[in-house]
Amino acid sequence: MQVGIVRAGAAVHIKPEGEMTIYHAADLKAQMLPAIRSAAEVEIDLSGVSEMDTAGFQLLVMVKRELAERGQSLRLVGHSPATLEVLDWYQMAGYFGDPVVLTS
């Protein structure tokens, strides 16, 4: 699992590539938490996520809560089919509040 992190002023763009599963959750958390701590705005591009399980989903929930506690915003973009499946399964697309764009 690779995570691309790009800072642009107070904003951070995070792009995980590969599996967001229990096998990678600890590593993802270790990479993402330091990146979001100093950001006023965080965008996570999910287009490169090939598989997501409950651990990957819980990581997104944790990031959202962490940011909300500090009054910061989280945007999820580029939802891959794997991430859409999990968000749909848990009926949590509304929780994140981002538009989900379905591509053909």
Image (cartoon, grey):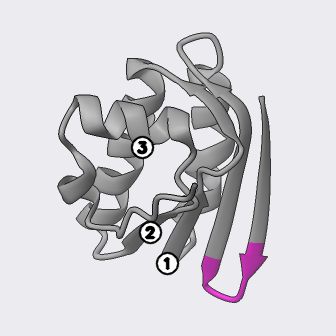
Q: Quadrant of the N terminus?
A: top right
Q: Position of residue 40 (x, y in %)?
A: 48, 80
Instruction: Give neighbour class at mark 3: few <14, some 14-19, many 20+ (Cα, 10 Å).
Output: some
What's the CA distance linking mark 2 and mark 1?
8 Å
Q: Position of residue 4 (x, y in %)?
A: 80, 53
Q: Residue furthest top?
A: 23
Instruction: Give neighbour class at mark 2: few <14, some 14-19, many 20+ (Cα, 10 Å).
Output: some
- 38 or 98, which lies in front? 98
- The stretch in magenta equals 7-11
User: Which circle marks residue 1 in the picture?
Assistant: none
- Give, as a three-letter code, the residue at label 3: Leu
Q: Is residue 58 one of those drawn in magenta?
A: no
Identify the mark nearer the N-term, 3 or 1.
1
User: Which circle marks residue 75 in the picture?
Assistant: 2
Helix, strand, or loop for circle 1?
strand
Residue under the image location 64 percent in, 58 percent down: 35
Q: Are marks 3 and 2 in contact (CB under 8 Å)?
A: no
Residue under the image location 57 percent in, 70 percent down: 38
Q: Are marks 2 and 1 in contact (CB under 8 Å)?
A: yes
Residue ID for mark 1? 41
Classify residue 86 by image quadrant.
top left
- Give, as a three-letter code, the residue at label 2: Arg
